[in-house]
Image (cartoon, helix red, strand yellow):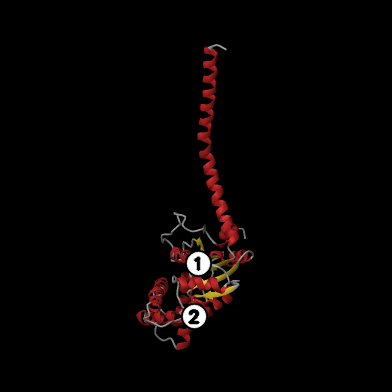
Amino acid sequence: MTASCKNKSTEKQLAGRRQLLKSLTILPTGLCMGMLATNSVLAQDSVANSVKALVFDVFGTVVDWRASIIREGQLLAARKGYQVDWAEFADRWRSGYGPAMNKVRTGELPWTRIDDLHRMILDELVQEYALTGMDEAELDHFNKAWHRLSPWPDTVAGLNRLKTKYVIATLSNGNVALLTNMAKNAGMPWDAVLSAELARHYKPDPEAYLTAADLLGLPPEQVMMVAAHPSDLRAAARTGLHTAYVIRPLERGPGRPVDLNPAGEFDYTATDFLDLARQLGA
């Protein structure tokens, strides 16, 4: 073979190698994107299959507290003739909840059930809104409006689907009697009613989450917290629980900003309980 033929053969081999290398530099981009998507799905499947129990925040996540309290106020006004902005009243009653719990958390108050904290807030609002003429039985009935909160439209059907695969339980700051009456009233199919009352620590104290896992006989990593409030989920995650964020855009009324979990910090993000059940394979 002449030198000229050898050079041409070598050039063809080099050109073939360059083309092969070029194709290999192109392929990984597509492959990596596919692998990332596959890994994400596999990671979610792994979580869905490793979790044994779902524990749910209740106020705002499971039930529509605001519309329910507005309705209860309107029913009261029909009997007593009060002229009140019940949407504002509901927001004020709810806004007293956090500060009241903080008084317990800091030791300013001894351990106090949510029913009793609700009543303390209500007594102040009764004076402020001049809701005169109510006797003790009427005040007690109105305070227990929180026992009669209505579920979101997807709640009962979604819980029943999730129950086919997981143990489902409340994990609320509401006391056990409140949560039990609420479930009875709305037909919610809990396997267990767990409450911060059992830990004597209100969320987001870590004891509330860890006690729930312990009472279910599970390590934290086999429990998933389901909530409409990112702060609740972050606190749960710090104790080792998995997290599912359910978006409830109307919890505080129309026109409020909604956190859509753009950073993807939670294991799942769902539009409602039925969507969560679909994602979890229930």
Which residue is at the far top?
Answer: 2
Q: In front here: 245 or 25?
A: 25
Q: Position of residue 128 (x, y in %)?
A: 35, 80
Q: Residues within 10 Å of mark 1 (few under 14, many from 20)?
A: many
Quarter the N terminus occupies? top right
| Residue drawn at the location 55% of the way across and 54% of the way down | 43
**Reading the chain from its start, which is encountered first: label 2 or label 1?**
1
Q: In front here: 18 or 143?
A: 18
Quarter the C terminus occupies? bottom right
Q: Position of residue 279 (x, y in %)?
A: 58, 57
| Residue drawn at the location 49% of the way across and 83% of the way down | 141
Q: Position of residue 242 (x, y in %)?
A: 52, 62
Tag 1, which secondary structure? loop
Q: In front here: 219 or 252?
A: 219
The residue tagged 2 is: 144
Q: In front here: 33 or 68?
A: 33
| Residue drawn at the location 58% of the way across and 76% of the way down | 184
Task: Report the amino acid beneath label 1.
Answer: Thr
The residue tagged 1 is: 61
Task: Report the amino acid beneath label 2.
Answer: Lys
Which residue is at the far left?
Answer: 128
Q: Residues within 10 Å of mark 2 (few under 14, many from 20)?
A: some
Tag 2, which secondary structure? helix
| Residue drawn at the location 53% of the way across and 20% of the way down | 10
